[in-house]
């Protein structure tokens, strides 16, 4: 039993927990709390179950009192750092004033102010936002919006969606259908997948889908729009509703400068709605407010989530251009209303968390900090890790605070360590860096996406821990050195 803390309404919050309380919580957690993406055997293994109790800017603390640098900002979302008191008090004030309104009938003051603010920050003339509860929902909504827009524009045959192979867009049915193969590999969900989805290979030079070896020759990236055009022509442009992609592909590989303008041109040429999934890249992650601003291209529809509230409360949203929104406005009858409704869309407390978080980001220049610290992190990763460790295959990133380091057994052949993300190498690596106080995904690739509040000193600590851990890993799992 957890002894209540009499000083708190949230009575379970305490400075210290006894050994009995911790053991009891672990037991209840294993039994009742469904941990995502984990197999039970991993959770019950020694040290396999972690309970976090506190967060403070770039750090999180577990129930045993261990302190970690949160090098992934939770899941790419704690942009303003953990435990921001200003968001907490704004949320509490809004919650005790108006804690819910039905977005199917009414709007709210924070909802209106937030949507206005978003249209000022966004690329191009994206100026109306449909709010929802999370990222996967936003991706689903974006695809429905594109299809209904094509339908009411008279393009009734334009129903198919093209996405990029290997990209993650969420775990629900629609996003899984356009997303990477991982979650459907076993075939369990095949009959649930959306029909009319095609995939094109991404601009991913490290493991170039077209077999180019020279990573400095970014021309290979341009094969991706060429393939895209082949697919469009092969399927018939009159059948394609939308193309969906994230600003940079998984693995944080930056596409060539001409990649996005070429995709934009194709979408214009064939009247295809360009959907940018900004769920990770949005809100400063790449050192600009939105990822597509890095490439000078404006999408027609944009999905947002995660860092919109600084990760303080769950949120999702879909932004559409004025032209798309007005096409709905000018359509008479039922088809003029977007056919979607969600209970939690535009929740006033969530809107408040987002407004306050954006205010803090602007005031504290966090987008600029992401740009500056991102460069520093990338330089350190290249000069300390890539330079000294033969098991570092590729350092992806260089724009803002989104990096991915691909580990390989053989740098020349790019052969990965066996076992993938759940193998012995990956598990040992993750446990090792955790033991040194670094919380992130490690293994066959290491994700680095810390809060945008990060400083040089904390980056040095991250690099130091990785350097030390890689040295030990290379002793335990020696890479092939040519
Ligand atoms: C690019 C991208 N799109 C969509 C999603 C799905 O968001 P959520 O987990 O909030 O459903 C994610 C989640 O990580 C994502 O990275």
Image (spheres, rainbow, N blue to C red):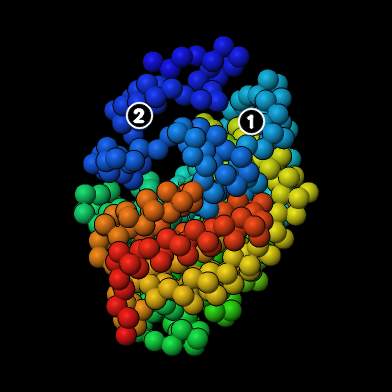
Residue 353's quadrant in the figure? top right
Residue 114 in the figure: left or right of residue 237: right
Q: Which residue occupies 39% across, 53% down?
A: 432
Depth check: 396 or 265 in front?
A: 396
Question: Is the distance from the Cβ of mark 2 to the nearest ligand 1 atom less than 8 Å?
Answer: no
Q: Which residue is labeled 1 in the image? A: 349
- The 10 Å Cα crowd at callout 1, few under 14, some 14 to 19, many 20 or more, is many
* Residue 173 numbered tag: none
Q: Nearer the viewer, residue 230 or 110?
A: 110
- Return the x and y of residue 172 as percentages of the image width and height: 38, 46
Q: Residue at x 57, y 11 (%)?
A: 6
Residue identifier under label 2: 26
Element carrying mark 1: helix
- Relative to residue 154, is residue 210 drawn left or right? left
21 is higher (above) or lower (below) than 289: above
Residue at position x 66%, y 51% in the image: 453
């Amino acid at each position: 039993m957890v002894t209540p803390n009499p000083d708190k309404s949230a009575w379970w919050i305490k400075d210290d927990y006894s050994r009995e309380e911790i053991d009891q919580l672990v037991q209840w957690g294993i039994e009742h709390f469904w941990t995502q993406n984990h197999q039970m055997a991993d959770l019950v293994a020694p040290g396999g179950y972690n309970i976090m109790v506190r967060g403070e800017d770039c750090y999180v603390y577990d129930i045993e009192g261990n302190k970690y640098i949160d090098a992934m900002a939770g899941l790419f979302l704690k942009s303003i750092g953990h435990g921001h008191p200003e968001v907490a008090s704004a949320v509490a004030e809004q919650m005790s004033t108006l804690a819910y309104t039905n977005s199917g009938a009414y709007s709210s003051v924070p909802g209106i102010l937030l949507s206005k603010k978003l249209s000022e920050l966004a690329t191009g003339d994206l100026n109306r936002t449909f709010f929802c509860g999370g990222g996967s929902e936003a991706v689903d909504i974006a695809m429905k919006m594109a299809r209904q827009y094509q339908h009411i524009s008279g393009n009734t045959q334009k129903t198919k969606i093209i996405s990029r192979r290997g990209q993650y867009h969420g775990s629900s049915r629609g996003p899984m259908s356009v997303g990477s193969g991982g979650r459907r590999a076993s075939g369990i969900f095949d009959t649930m997948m959306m029909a009319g989805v095609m995939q094109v290979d991404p601009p991913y030079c490290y493991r170039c889908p077209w077999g180019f070896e020279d990573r400095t020759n970014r021309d290979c990236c341009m094969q991706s729009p060429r393939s895209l055009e082949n697919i469009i022509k092969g399927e018939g442009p009159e059948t394609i509703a939308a193309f969906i992609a994230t600003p940079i592909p998984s693995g944080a590989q930056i596409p060539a400068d001409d990649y996005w303008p070429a995709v934009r041109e194709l979408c214009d040429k064939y009247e295809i709605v360009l959907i940018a999934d900004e769920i990770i890249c949005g809100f400063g992650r790449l050192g600009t407010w939105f990822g597509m601003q890095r490439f000078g291209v404006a999408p027609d529809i944009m999905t947002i989530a995660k860092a919109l509230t600084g990760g303080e409360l769950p949120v999702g949203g879909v932004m559409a251009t004025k032209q798309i929104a007005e096409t709905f406005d000018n359509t008479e009858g039922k088809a003029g209303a977007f056919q979607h409704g969600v209970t939690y869309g535009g929740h006033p407390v969530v809107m408040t968390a987002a407004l306050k978080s954006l205010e803090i980001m602007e005031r504290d220049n966090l987008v600029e900090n992401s740009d500056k610290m991102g460069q520093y992190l990338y330089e350190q990763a290249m000069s300390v890790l890539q330079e000294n460790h033969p098991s570092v295959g590729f350092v992806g990133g260089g724009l803002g605070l989104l990096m991915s380091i691909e580990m390989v057994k053989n740098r020349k052949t790019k052969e990965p360590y066996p076992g993938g993300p759940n193998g012995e190498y990956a598990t040992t690596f993750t446990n090792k860096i955790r033991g040194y106080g670094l919380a992130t995904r490690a293994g066959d690739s290491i994700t680095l996406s810390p809060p945008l509040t990060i400083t040089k000193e904390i980056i040095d600590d991250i690099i130091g821990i990785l350097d030390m851990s890689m040295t030990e890993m290379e002793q335990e799992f020696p890479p092939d050195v040519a």
